[in-house]
Image (cartoon, rainbow, N blue to C red):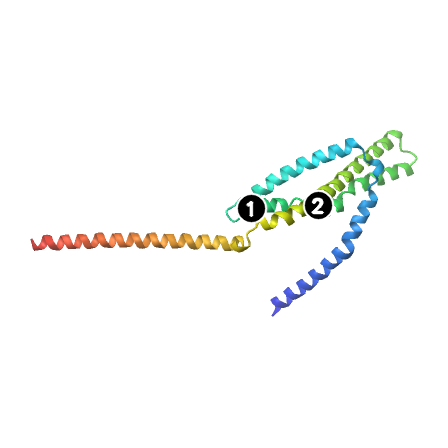
Amino acid sequence: SKGSDRNAITRIVSAHLKAFWVGDAEPFLFVLIGASVSVTFLNGTIVGQSLAVLIVGLCVRLLVSVLCVYTKQFTQGERLFISMAWLPKATVQAAIGAVALDAARARLLDLEKTHLANSTAISEAKTNVQHGQNILTLAVLAILVTAPIGAALIALCGPRLLDRESGGAEERVEEEEKDELRQDRSTNELNFAEDSSDESKLEFEAELTSRI
């Protein structure tokens, strides 16, 4: 059928794109990011401030992640695991971490080529280059800190926080709904039995009264 053919084509294309990304594009991207980082730009102040911003951001993200999945479809362990699974940062930071630095360098190069540019504009452009370098430093630190820690947390905490025998969230919700239906049915049957017994008593009393 058309649906099965479309699904098969989707799986084939997805497999090829995944192989290209893992085998070629992703290593090339991280190599370029590594080449853009210079140790000479690093200093204790910038690294310390970057780590402070990173830690505060990760704490807020961890809390928000738990709140976003705080529903009855997930157990407490699953909520904690989801928040930890969202902890690692790498691909997005590697892709856009150097955008600000590239734009600042391009602006500085244009000003240096233009002889009419004043010293103030060139000085501001150099300051922007430094800011771009700081942003790239923060992106690289985010990768170096969160990627290994997140991978370790997922590998170590996954088997402990996730229950393989309990099934998925949808299955648990279905079971809960079935249990509620069973309870409602039992309650209705009990009420019907009580109502029936009351009617029988009334009929019996009425028959006795008529005889008397």
> Going by the picture, which residue comes out furthest to the bottom?
1
Who is closer to the viewer here, 173 or 118?
173
Labelled disc at residue 148:
2
What residue would you read off at disc 1?
77
Q: Position of residue 180 (x, y in %)?
A: 41, 52
Is residue 80 shown left or right of residue 178? right
- Image quarter (top left, top right, bottom left or bottom right) of the N terminus: bottom right
- Residue 13 to residue 83: above or below: below
Q: What's the residue type where badge 2 is placed? A: Pro
Q: Position of residue 115 (x, y in %)?
A: 93, 35
Is residue 111 shown left or right of residue 189? right
Residue in view at x 61 percent, y 67 percent = 4
Please tell me whether mark 1 sits on a helix, a strand or a loop: helix
Residue in view at x 70 percent, y 43 percent = 146
Who is closer to the viewer here, 98 or 61?
61
Determine which quarter of the picture holds residue 8.
bottom right
- Crowding near pointer 1: few (<14 within 10 Å), some, many (20+)? some
Q: CA distance from mark 2 to mark 1?
A: 21 Å
Please count the marks in the image.
2
Q: Position of residue 173 (x, y in %)?
A: 48, 52
Residue in view at x 63 percent, y 64 percent = 7
Who is closer to the viewer here, 157 or 121?
157
> Going by the picture, which residue comes out furthest to the left?
212
Sequence-first disc among 2 and 1: 1
- Residue 26 to residue 101: above or below: below
> Going by the picture, which residue comes out furthest to the top?
120
Who is closer to the viewer here, 10 or 30?
30
Q: What's the residue type where badge 1 is placed? A: Gly
Q: Position of residue 56 (x, y in %)?
A: 66, 35
Please tell me whether mark 2 sits on a helix, a strand or a loop: helix
- Crowding near pointer 2: few (<14 within 10 Å), some, many (20+)? few
Is residue 212 shown left or right of residue 36? left
